[in-house]
Amino acid sequence: MKKTLQYLLFFVLGAGLIWYSIASGIINPTKLWDDVSHANLWWVAAMIVFMIIAHGSRAARWKMLLEPLGYNPSFMNVNNAVWLGYFANNLVPRLGEVTRCSQLYKSDGIPIDKSLGTVVTDRIFDVVTLFLLLLLHFVLDFDKLWAFIEQQMAQNAGNGGHKSTLIYLLLGAVLLGGIIFAIFRKKILAIGIVQTILEKVKGLLDGLLSIRHLKNPGLFIFWSVLIWAMYWLMGYVLFYAIPKFAGLPPIAGLTFLVAGALAMILPSPGGAGTITAIVSPIFVTMYGLSKDDAGTLSTFVQSSQMLATLVIGAIVFLISIFITKPHDK
């Protein structure tokens, strides 16, 4: 019952943000349909090719994480499991990780708890990569990003004076927190919830350091770079599908990638609603798009990728049912 309510909440969140986007003018349904109906589908086909490469690279990287545990499934089985994971995530957020581990148990008999541990490590590297991309974005497009941040702060604070006060209060709180921690460090570290947090952090570090146990760490890094390079291309090539967006610079593709990935923290099926609501205002401020054009672009990219994942994922699902032989346990 709890899981059902959680999944229902995910759908309500996505539907609510779609309604908000339409009601606030971010999505103009008439204009959206007119632009999308004239889109060049060859660029959509290119996106699908990059998606296949991205998911294949993730499968190759995941296979490397499984090998130190003594398992050596075929690339095809791992790749199918990855696709089924993305297929499930686009239907029910947060279900994909368990789905791909369950599929690998079905095809190769790898215990779910073992493969799930490698998925956690896989996600840790994704978080680190996303953080590095965010830093790279700041370096490459600092002026536009800072202008966007200042605009958001000004809107939230109401005026410059309030904004400055808020900054000083935050700095003061950080300083005061540091002093309190220095004085009561032993007592704070003895608190149960603090110990739990430290254990989680240690687990993250252990996951990152697990790369040392791989046979070829350089190849692991190569697959990691290729995954995110393909993610960038998956979004950027779709800009060319609608001519008015073809003039956006390559850095805009990185903007969409980073902002879209952060938007996915809010769980909705395939990022429906969340990506449009969060990415669109960024493109209005940073790249001068009108509100409805930014809504069209973000909705088109998100829905194209979601639809491709669902179609290919459904094909892989049918293959897993009728072709994949269950592992002899």
Image (spheres, rainbow, N blue to C red):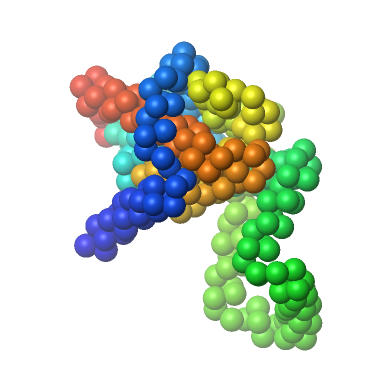
Q: Could you say where residue 18 lies in the image, as x and y percent from the top left?
A: 38, 48
Check the picture and name the quadrant holding the N terminus.
bottom left
- Above or below, comparing residue 133 to residue 72 in the picture: below
Which residue is rendered at x = 47% and y = 35% of the image? 296
- Where is residue 193, by image quadrant? bottom right
Q: Is residue 2 in sight in this rendering?
A: yes
Does residue 259 appear left or right of residue 177 in this picture? left
Q: Could you say where residue 109 lies in the image, as x and y percent from the top left?
A: 33, 35
Viewer-proximal residue among 230 and 126? 230
- Above or below, comparing residue 205 to residue 318 in the picture: below
Q: Could you say where residue 52 lies in the image, as x and y percent from the top left?
A: 47, 22
Viewer-proximal residue among 150 and 67? 150
How many discs mark residues in the rendered view? 0
Does residue 242 appear left or right of residue 142 in this picture? left
- Where is residue 199, by image quadrant? bottom right
Q: Could you say where residue 9 lies in the image, as x and y percent from the top left?
A: 32, 58
Which residue is rendered at x = 29% and y = 34% of the image? 106
